[in-house]
């Protein structure tokens, strides 16, 4: 079934270039009216210009779509509220939010200034919080919404020199997990995308061959699938070079050692059993961990 977004309104942050631009173009091609939001700064988050956002709007309009440019900074909640208010005044609704804006300040943790840690968290995590908060009541009232958080393999699996970026990106997974529970009764579905693409954030790190394989446009179909009417929720979709995978946070069956004096030693001697994924589950919520642990306790004492 073709995913048709006609009549819907989408906000895509950081969409003046790279992945965000491709997301915006694809959503517009499928019928959505798109807010192209981009501060227009450097990869490090320095400077500001609406030129890039306006250029993407021009592309969308040239193809017969509707779009508007926004230079609002995702780190400034007041600016984001104003952007959303302008969107509502123009189109009357917000159906889709793609939190894509980001910056890099890569250094090893030993050499990293705390300001570089805070700034990256402020853009990636708090930027997504600001944008999501600004549209949350709108989506609740209309009982429909689709939100995509852009996580990263650097957060899911770690990457040397990216403690700030990785921490922010993994935090977005936690944000998705809770908001998906709170938004479920209102028809709001929230997912994460972990993209691999040749963007300006990867400048100087990839060969020409790799750049051609890792085109940003190859990732965007994943966004479309995550914001469609039949989208899943609480999914971490990995995407790159035309391939798509899912990362899941699992809880292994583990072991029960009780309150024995040598409990720590039993744990240390049984790492393999604790890590064994046979019988693992994907918890529905935080209480599931406690439920598993209580069940093992009951089994251990014969109840």
Image (spheres, rainbow, N blue to C red):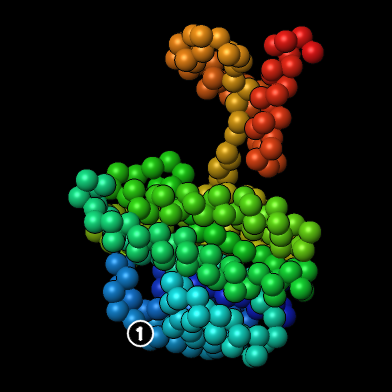
Could you tell me residue 201's position as x and y percent? 33, 62
Locate the N terminus and report the quarter of the image it occupies.
bottom right
Q: Identify residue for label 1.
A: 49
* Rendered residue at 65%/85% (across/down): 88
Could you tell me residue 18's position as x and y percent? 41, 68
Residue toward you, 7 or 302: 302
Could you tell me residue 138's position as x and y percent? 70, 75
Report crowding for label 1: few under 14, some 14 to 19, many 20 or more residues within 10 A (C-alpha).
Answer: some
* Rendered residue at 73%/14% (across/down): 299
Image vertical order of residue 282 relative to residue 256, above or below: below
Image vertical order of residue 91 relative to residue 105, above or below: below
Specify whether residue 36 is in view. Answer: no
Which residue occupies the extreme left position in the image? 111
* Rendered residue at 50%/80% (across/down): 78
Locate the C terminus and report the quarter of the image it occupies.
top right
* Rendered residue at 49%/72% (across/down): 13
Tag 1's secondary structure? loop
Q: In the displayed structure, does residue 181 sit left or right of residue 59?
A: right
Image vertical order of residue 272 relative to residue 165, above or below: above
Residue toward you, 208 or 30: 30
């Amino acid at each position: 079934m073709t995913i048709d977004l006609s009549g819907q309104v989408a906000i895509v942050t950081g969409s003046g270039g790279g992945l965000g631009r491709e997301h915006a173009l694809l959503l517009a091609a499928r019928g959505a009216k798109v807010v192209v939001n981009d501060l227009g700064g450097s990869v490090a988050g320095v400077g500001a210009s609406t030129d890039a956002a306006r250029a993407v709007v021009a592309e969308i309009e040239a193809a017969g779509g509707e779009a508007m440019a926004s230079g609002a900074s995702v780190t400034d909640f007041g600016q984001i509220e104003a952007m959303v208010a302008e969107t509502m005044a123009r189109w009357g609704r917000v159906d889709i939010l793609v939190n894509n804006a980001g910056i890099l300040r890569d250094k090893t943790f030993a050499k990293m200034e705390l300001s570089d840690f805070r700034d990256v968290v402020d853009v990636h995590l708090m930027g997504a919080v600001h944008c999501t908060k600004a549209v949350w009541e709108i989506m609740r009232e209309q009982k429909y919404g689709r939100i995509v958080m852009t996580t990263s393999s650097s957060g899911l699996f770690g990457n040397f020199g990216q403690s700030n970026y990785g921490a922010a990106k993994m935090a977005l997974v936690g944000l998705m997990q809770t908001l998906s529970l709170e938004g479920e009764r209102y028809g709001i579905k929230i997912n994460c995308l972990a993209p691999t693409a040749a963007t300006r954030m990867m400048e100087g790190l990839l060969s020409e061959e790799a750049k051609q394989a890792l085109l940003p446009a190859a990732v965007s179909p994943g966004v479309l699938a995550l914001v469609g009417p039949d989208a899943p929720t609480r999914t971490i979709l990995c995407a790159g070079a035309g391939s798509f995978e899912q990362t899941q946070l699992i809880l292994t069956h583990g072991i029960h050692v009780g309150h024995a004096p040598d409990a720590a030693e039993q744990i240390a001697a049984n790492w393999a059993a604790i890590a064994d994924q046979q019988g693992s589950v994907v918890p529905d919520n935080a209480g599931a961990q406690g439920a598993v642990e209580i069940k093992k306790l009951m089994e251990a004492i014969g109840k």
